[in-house]
Image (cartoon, rainbow, N blue to C red):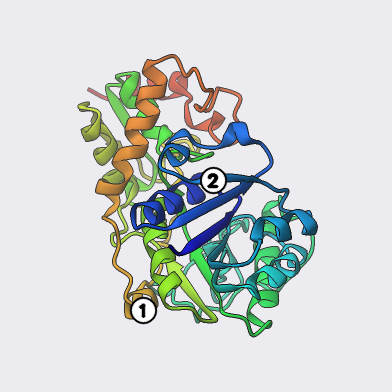
Amino acid sequence: MPRALILGGTGLIGRAAALRLLDAGWQVDVTGRDPARMPHEIAAAGARFVAADRGEERQLRAAMGDGADLLVDCLCYTAADARLLLPLAGNATSTVLISSRAVYVDADGNHANSGTPPRFDGPITEAQPTLAPGDMDYRSGEGYGPNKVAAEHVALDSGLPITVVRPSLIHGAGAATPREWVFVKRALDRRGAVLLAHRGSGVVHPTAAANLAALLETVAGRPGARILNCADPDAPNARDIARIVAGRLGHAWEEVLLDGTAAEELGRTPWDSPHPVVLDMSAAEELGYQPAGDYAATVAAEVDWLADAARAGDPAGILPDADHPYFGWFFDYAAEDTFLAARTP
């Protein structure tokens, strides 16, 4: 039985990867600091929790044990993190480091977290230029991408069979930042209209955790040092996503497509890039990767998970509250109602 070790495996990516590998007959061990955060479904499916802090070398080595056929690092944010990964990768047949599409820059140096949104010439390949490596605070918008690049360099310069995977906006049941909540909550609140900035045309390529898991399984059988993008086979815009979520929840609303004359705070969504951000998946496909499904098929589990939690009163505390730093500004219903009431009949 092949063995997989997933560092930081109790989160969204680890959850999806563990379920896929377990279903394929793997032995799966996931690390974390708190066993209470072990998802019930992967424990029930046979995954084993191993207590290990990602920053503690001795604990990581103990978790690695005699080796693994697949090693997945979901918590590699810095060059220092990558250096701790290398001894483990030396004892694994295939290793995957989860990076991010936030490393990419356009011709003017703009990126996902810059003040000016990036403008790419077309689908982004793995050859697209990236930010320079850096070691500032990786938890900041300015530091996240440079630190990921620095981690990538350490891994790829090692000569070990480490595959760097760059996903985009990851979605799935168990997401810590479930972006689809922007539309799920509106549908559950039975809002009669949904306001969409940029006429709902914004595109930022989503990545299903289930599709990321499919790519990890592919890489497990094809070890190597490389970089691979990972995103869904389709790239829906904000309007498409609103329709998919509302349809899943059996809700219909009026679509109010806003142009540049509307107030900036109206109709904002996580997919509002003024220029399309789409990842090219050719390299993964050439490796033999086949996606688990398109956006509509793979997002259904997350929509149901969010809706079920809301209907049950959110006993596990998974839903963003009104003070959430990411979601707070997406739900100004009063401003939306004022705008709608002022429209010319």
What residue is disc 1 on? 287
Residue 324 in view (yes/no): yes
- How many numbered tags mark residues here? 2
Left or right: residue 288 compared with residue 116: left
Left or right: residue 335 compared with residue 105: left
Residue 272 in view (yes/no): no
Which residue is pictured at 48% across the width and 32% down the height? 330
Which residue is pictured at 67% across the width and 53% down the height? 141
Say what secondary structure mark 2 lies in: strand
Q: CA distance from mark 2 to mark 1?
A: 29 Å
Q: Reading the chain from its start, which is encountered first: label 2 or label 1?
A: 2
What label does residue 110 carry, if any? none
What residue is disc 2 on? 48
Q: In x, y percent, where is residue 201?
A: 33, 51
Query: Is residue 157 placed above or below 189 in the rendered structure?
Result: below
Which residue is pictured at 79% across the width and 54% down the height? 56
Question: In the picture, residue 241 is in which quadrant?
Answer: top left
Amino acid found under the numbered disc labelled 1: Leu
